Image (cartoon, rainbow, N blue to C red):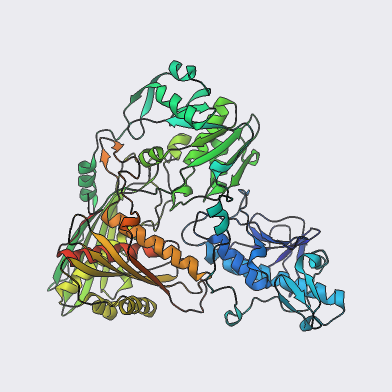
Amino acid sequence: MVYSLAASTLTIAAPLACDTSPAQGTEPARGPSDALVTGADDEMLVLEVTRANRIVVRLPRVEVGQGITTAVAMMIAEELDARLADVDIPLADARTKGNQYTGGSNSVVSLYGPACQLAATARARLVTAAARRWHLPAWSLRTGNTMVIAPDGRTATFGSLSASAAKIRRTAVSAKPKPASEHKVIGRPATRIDARDIVTGKAKYTGDLSVAGAKPTVVARPPTLGGKIVSVDERAARALPGVHAVVRVPGGVAVVAETFHHAFNARDALKIKWAAGPSASLSDAQIRSRLKAAVPHLGSPPRGSTQVEGEFEFAFVSHAPMEVLTAIADVRAHRAEIWFSSQTPTDARDSIASATGLPASEVTVHVLRGGGSFGRRLNFDAAIEAALISKAAKRPVKLMWSRNDDTRHGRMRPAGHHRIRASHADGRVVAFAHATASVSESYGKKGTANQASFVRPVSAPHPSDSGLYNFGRLSGDSGQVELAMPLGAWRSVDSGTTRTAQEIMVDEVARSLGKDPVAFRRTTLRSKAVKAVLDKVAEAGNWGRAMPDGHGQGVAVHEEYGSCVACLAEIDASDPKNPRVTKVVMAADVGTAVNPRGLEAQLMGTSIDGISTVLSAGLHIDRGAVREGSFGDFHWARQRNAPLHFEAHIMPSKGEPGGAGELGVPAASGAVANAYARATGTKPRRFPLNF
């Protein structure tokens, strides 16, 4: 379905929802024509061809470094035969309804069809408008470089045709998207459309904005998670230069000042007495013990089978996006305006409205690009807090969570415990059982806005998804431990731990059967596509080559989001306490890869995630507090830890696009863990390994 919007330029819209029923108050298109409506439904993707010859699509997703703006620009440029440089993809503000969720590796999947159809329809309108202007048959015209071109060489820019194209209801040429065989943009590696802006500083993040009157703001936070204020002596802080306001909020005490330097100085001058948080009696050892006890029993194995068993522990992990959380809020008596990077802006708007006591219709949320997310910006802790501070201070504020704030009080991937048993008989696996326990996500689902900030979107548990293999009878269950912890969906969510543990067990089963890990996978994998990516990394990575003592190779595979991936990692563990991944080879089948260069970057990023969370990066809980506070002690992989050699292979495909942003994390994690096991002759069980 495509709809024309009442405008002086060519402006058309397509629904984003899976339901293709007409938007309320409109009539569906019939054949190549469509309905004329007076405004863009919130659930639509809208394309405008401006008189300045710009193609503008306001994107109901957020750009957090994953390259979605480039991918959508490529879809539009492909179907319109426009220059990529002529396509603008600004981010849409929060809408009153509709899907603006950025997550679950679904952006390209959900936008591909509507974007291609929009652009193909616009192209047909523009060609028809040119044919009428020139009194030529529409079939004789062609398009290219954001222009319509006549057989005699005459040209007309799309912008010059936009007004007349807006009046056309029935096109003289097909409005169907091109077949993949005719693609010239989609599937070709492209540099990000915002790359130059990012490296030159032109790209604007929340911290770069200057909103009238918005003053730098920071918050003094409790030493333990969920700690409460008992008393505050703010006299010394208020006496310092540049201080505008000191206000209490549910998460602590906020200082609004002339500069962030003034704000931090005043924050440190506050004398606060804190009550300990609800988890103050807990540290890592107790949490691990409770998680292990919460794992359901696996039941009895098949009679006559041999068992391969393993238990695995995964620590809490911070998202740690490079851009710290920042939000600007201007809350007045009857309205509010908020600026920040959000993966869930409609939910954020509703929550901000609830927290401030305003109608949702009076809250405007401007969505900005984010400097990384990995799931962190699904939640809007900073935005709610900024709104509450602005309301209390009666002025606009620019709130920044420091790195320490987010590491010690922000979202974490839940810690978990996995118990797996593979049963084999007569040379094959006849049963596979996988039970898990993780920290519950239920904390704070009721109560204040501050408590609500601890909630993350609930994901389906993965007690056993080893259906990837022909492993006979599959079983699994999951348990939970109730802890007052601020949890958040972390890149690849449950798959990042579930598949890692399973791929380690696949290697150990192969070893128990006396088989090579790659050969064993080839004979047991169900999917031809997964076998193909495995074969690709084995060939490209020279699987099985002779390695020096203390060095090893590891492989792992994963299938999700309609896509699949394999990873081969090589590691130097000659010093087992300081291992270094030296080589990573990945292969992915994601259907149509809109931008192979962007996909390669995604895979490279997931390899760093796997290296980090398996070898070095985790959060310790020490008497109800997160011990780590920055990259100085939260040991994410740095340049010296990155593989010396990385290569990515994108499998050719004519299928519809699948998801890719989170796809590689489980395979990379499993491959690194398996490489370490083979290099050291050990069985890694606790991650990261340095815990």
Q: Residue at x 45, y 43 (%)?
A: 324
Please state if 227 lies on the left or on the right of 359 as rendered.
Answer: left
Question: In the image, is residue 96 above or below residue 58?
Answer: above
Is residue 297 visible to us here? no
Query: Percent from the top left, x then y, of residue 574?
Result: 17, 62
Please state if 29 lies on the left or on the right of 100 as rendered.
Answer: right
Query: Percent from the top left, x then y, of residue 578?
Result: 22, 55
Q: Residue at x 21, y 50 (%)?
A: 292
Residue 677: image quadrant is bottom left
- State the residue in front, 598 or 173: 598
Please state if 577 lies on the left or on the right of 80 as rendered.
Answer: left
Residue 519: image quadrant is bottom left
Residue 171: image quadrant is bottom right
Is residue 458 visible to us here? yes
Query: Percent from the top left, x then y, of residue 100?
Result: 57, 54
**Quarter in which the N terminus is drawn:** bottom right
Q: Residue at x 16, y 63 (%)?
A: 680
Question: In the image, is residue 534 above or below residue 297?
Answer: below
Query: Percent from the top left, x then y, of residue 444?
Result: 40, 39
Question: In the image, is residue 472 above or below residue 496?
Answer: below
Marker count (numbered): 0
